[in-house]
Image: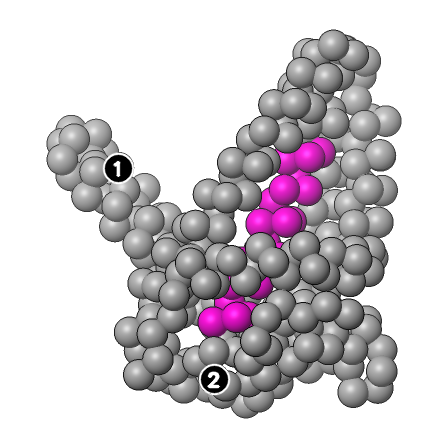
Amino acid sequence: MKKLSPFHLIGYATTAFVRNFGTLLGLTAPGLLVFVAAAVVGRLLLPPGAAAEAQLALGEAGIVLSLGMLATNLALIPAFTGWHRLLILGEARRENGRTFGWDGREWRYLRNLISIWLVSVGVNLVARLLAPAAEATPALAIVIVVTLLFCHLWIWAIGGMTLPAAALNDGRSFADIVNLLQGNVNRIGLALIGIGLLIGFVGFLLIMTLSAIGLASGSVYLSFVMTFLLYFIGLFAVVSVLSRAYALLAGAGSPPSAPSV
């Protein structure tokens, strides 16, 4: 039984970003254009003044940005499948030579993402139902928080491995994925925590810098947009970890190091 190293998965995901940054920009260009358009429209809808910008979650600007994020996520589905193929097979292009497209793989990928999201929402609802009891018992609150964290990690470690399978169209069922993961669910979960902390730390430094610039210029919009961009970067970091784990466990491609194209 192959045992994955969380440190290797984190290192590979980081190296993949650095060595294939140009390819990543090309893959994400359509989705980022949608996001930029929504960000510009949202900014135009804001009344002048930093105080109004602090309320971006409310009003027309917040609605535009929320719809923009939804459209961006849909536009990024082909980018996700292409990134999986690049990191597992060493080639982002499809059989017809094109990088972009939408076929059965993207629909399966979207279905799997929605399934992961629905399970996560279900776990959150259970935690919310237990919240009144947790407020009365601090020890129970700690148990619920830790359990909630592990549940989400298991959801992404197990359900997330169906994503590269969909991107490669290899026909593995959910049961096959579970068998493939034996003994490695926690290891993948630790890798997801590690890459999340790494991006969170770098993102914190960037947002603090942009916030300082924004306060000096009287606008906090730039740091707000950067928060959304870091969210997308985090998604691709997760995809990178899952891609490498799948390649090692399934023997699909398994490049010795992060490919460059």
From the viewer's perspective, tell me whether residue 197 is left or right of residue 42: left
Q: Secondary structure at mark 1?
A: helix
Per the rendering, the mark at residue 250 is: 2
Residue type, mark 2 in image: Ala
Pinpoint residue 50: horizontal percent, then vertical percent: 72, 13
Q: Quadrant of the C terminus?
A: bottom right
Q: CA distance from mark 1 to mark 2?
A: 40 Å
Residue that protrudes farthest toward the front in the picture = 256
- Where is residue 243, by image quadrant? bottom right
Decide if residue 79 is in sight here. yes
Please say whether residue 171 is one of the residues in the magenta stretch.
no
Q: Residue at x 34, y 74 (%)?
A: 3
Q: Residues within 10 Å of mark 1 (few under 14, many from 20)?
A: some
Q: Residue at x 43, y 50 (%)?
A: 194
From the viewer's perspective, tell me whether residue 228 is left or right of residue 40: left
Q: Residue at x 13, y 35 (%)?
A: 139
Q: Which residues are magenta?
A: 225-245
Pinpoint residue 152: horizontal percent, then vertical percent: 38, 55
Mark 1 and mark 2 lie on one chain; the one further toward the N terminus is 1
Q: Which residue is mark 1?
A: 131
Pinpoint residue 7: horizontal percent, then vertical percent: 42, 58
Q: Quadrant of the N terminus?
A: bottom left
Q: Coloured how?
A: one colour
Note whether 106 is above or below 210 in the view shown: below
Residue type, mark 1 in image: Ala
Q: Main secondary structure of the magenta part?
A: helix
